[in-house]
Structure formats: C-alpha cells, structure tokens
Image: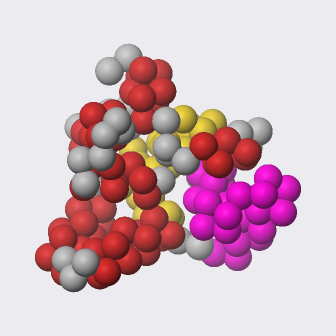
Amino acid sequence: MGLTVALDTNIFINVKNREEPYYRYSRRVLEAVDDGDVKALVSVIVVAEMCTGYYMFGDIEGEEEFLAYVLTSPNYEIADVDAKTADLAGKIRAEAGVRLPDAILIASAVLRNAYAVVTHDEELRKAEKLVRIMTAREFIASLGL
C-alpha cells in the first residue's frame, strides 16, 4: 500500500507503556507499519520526545532499541526539520494555535503528503483543514483492519 501516515509520539508511548484505552489500536497501527501495509512518517520531534522519556527513566537500552527500530525499518521515514518545514510550522502555530512541536509534526505531514496524522491529542484537530487528524482507532477502521 502506498499510504503514508505521520505518527505522533503518543502512539509509540501507548504501546511502550501499554496505556489503555489506546494500547490495542496504537499497537495495530505499528503492526500495520511493520507489516508494510502503510509507511510511517516520524518527525525528529517525535524521536526527541521519545528519547527524552527513555533518558528520564535511565532506560538507555530502550532508547537504543527505539532508535534502531525507527532508523532501520524500511517502513519508517524520519522527517528532519528544514527551513521550509520550520516556516510552515510557524504559520500553522500562528493560525491554528497548536504547540510548536505539534505544528512541526503537522508541517512535516503536509509537506510529505501524508494521508493523516495519527494521534490521541485532540488539540491537533485545530489543524484539520491542512491534513486529516485521526485517532489510532479511526485510522485502523479506515484501513478495514
């Protein structure tokens, strides 16, 4: 499938921490990526947020496993922040009122023509005129999985 979705940090955290009620659907999103059903776009902001959590809890092994996972899988693309992304993120932050890390995630998704941003952060819906914002459950349902 040629579908690309941008993943928010909370999708990874839901799975890592087995957080209900989101765990089941977030896990299915990551499984769909691992199975090659979809491609995942992961902003460097998401990488930084995940690494922060691992470092805060002294889980260096977990941090290394996470990085190896997203950096070596052919189904994950890491989205760097360049000037074009930063400019669009600034516009999104100003117009939609989302936090800057979220604006960067959304800008990355828009510039790479992602089908949707998959998140459990309802605040991101403020930018829904730019890109689809879907929960993991909504996204899995849209795939018919």
Picture mark count:
0
Please tell me which residue is depicted at 30% across the width and 67% down the height of the picture.
71
Q: Which quadrant would residue 29 be assigned to in this image?
A: top left
100 w.r.t. 36: above or below: below
94 w.r.t. 145: above or below: below
Residue 50 sits inside the magenta stretch:
no
Frontmost residue, 141 versus 123: 123
Residue 47 in percent (x, y) is at 40, 69
Magenta stretch: give its range: 82-111
Q: Quadrant of the N terminus?
A: top left
Q: Quadrant of the C terminus?
A: top left
Please tell me which residue is depicted at 43% across the width and 74% down the height of the picture.
48
Please tell me which residue is depicted at 76% across the width and 39% down the height of the picture.
129
**Residue farthest to the right?**
95
Residue 90 in percent (x, y) is at 78, 68
Q: Is residue 64 visible?
A: no
**Residue farthest to the left?**
61
